[in-house]
Structures are given as structure tokens and as C-alpha cells.
Image (cartoon, grey):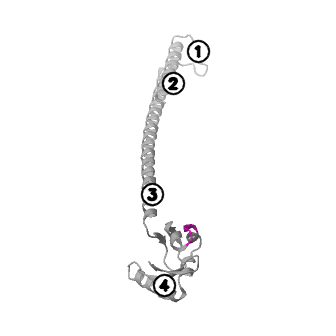
Amino acid sequence: GKQGTLIFGSLIFLFVTTFGFLEAQGFIVNQFSQFNAFADYLTIILCIALIAALQWLMIDQLNKNTNRANQELQVRKQVEQQLREAETQYRNLVERIPAVIYIAEPGKNGQWQYVSPQITQLTGFTPEEWLKDPHLWYDLIHPDDRSKSMMLESQALNAGGMPHLEYRLRTREGKYIWVYD
């Protein structure tokens, strides 16, 4: 961190300065050069200071990025919690309405994404059965009502509207009920 950069940089600066002073006073001898050039030590000190400054800036930027990421994570967690609460409220509302609510693709092969639990009371088939078998709806429509229902659905969708259908639907017990869809 920043404190380590300051301590480590200061220690290196102190060592280089100390060795430069000791060599200039003749207490130690440089084995690699017979000259004691202060410029060499100054260059090393400047390089160390530059590296320490760059390290300081990198650590500062990393800390800022980490703080920003933590803030974004907290916001995302709050949004996810709000979405879960909204979905729970929506499901509670939909599942208490005395009508069948569903989301499905149009047509006899349309995939079903959601069916409210009221479908079981109406038809005897569970929501899981409706979601598992995309042909169930079409197969349960009275044979005399199928082509008319498909035609009206197609016409309404082509016109950009919602289909309004009335047809007979077979229940699990085999009796037919009238459905306004």
C-alpha cells in the first residue's frame, strides 16, 4: 500500500545516500568503478523517487477503482433485491387474481413461459404440464374450434392487436368448458 511505498522508498533512499556518503569519505570502496561520482548516486535516488511516485499513483488508482467497484456492487445488490421483491409482489398479485394469467408464444406450437396456478382449478392440468408440453393448449381446444381460433389469433396478430378468442377447452376429466381468451 501507500505506507509500504513510503517506508520502502525511504529505506532505499537512506541506503543509497549512506553508501554514497561512506564511499565519498573513503570508508568503503566501489569495486566496479574507481571514480566516486555523486551524479551516479543522484541518478539512482531520482530513479527510486520516480518509481516510488509511480507506485504511489498506481496504488491510489487501484484503491479508487476498488472503491468504485464496491459501490457499484452495492448498488447492483440493492437493485437485485428490489427486483426480487417486485417479482414476489407481482407473483403474489397474479396468483391471487381469479383468472388464468399466462405468457405464451402464439400458434399451435407456441412455447409457454408462464401459467398461473389457477389453470389447475380451471382445467385440472398443472402449470408444469402446460409449460412442459407446448401442444397441450392446441390439443385441448375442441376440434370444431381449432381452425377458427388459429385464424382469429393470426388475424389479430397480423393487424398488430391482441387476439380475443372464445373456444371450448377440454378439461382433465374430459368435459368441455367455454373459455374467453
Q: How much space separates mark 3 and mark 1, taking CA atoms?
A: 78 Å
Whether label 3 touches label 4, CB < 8 Å: no
Which mark sits nearer the N-terminus, 3 or 4?
Answer: 3
Q: Residue at x 45, y 42 (%)?
A: 70
Q: Which residue is mark 2?
A: 8
Instruction: Please give left or right for residue 134 compared with residue 101 in the image.
Output: right
Q: Which residue is mark 1?
A: 29
Q: Main secondary structure of the magenta part?
A: loop
Image point (53%, 13%), residue name? 22
Whether tag 3 and tag 2 are in contact, CB under 8 A, the answer is: no
Report x, y in % for residue 65: 44, 41
The Cα–Cα distance between marks 3 and 4, rounded to whole angstroms, is 32 Å
Q: CA distance from mark 2 to mark 1?
A: 25 Å
- Nearest to the eye among marks 4 and 2: give it: 4
Query: Label 4 sits on what residue type?
Result: Met
- State which tag comes first along the sequence, 2 or 1: 2
Between the residue at mark 3 and the residue at mark 2, the CA separation in whole angstroms equals: 54 Å
| Front residue (pair 74, 175) | 175
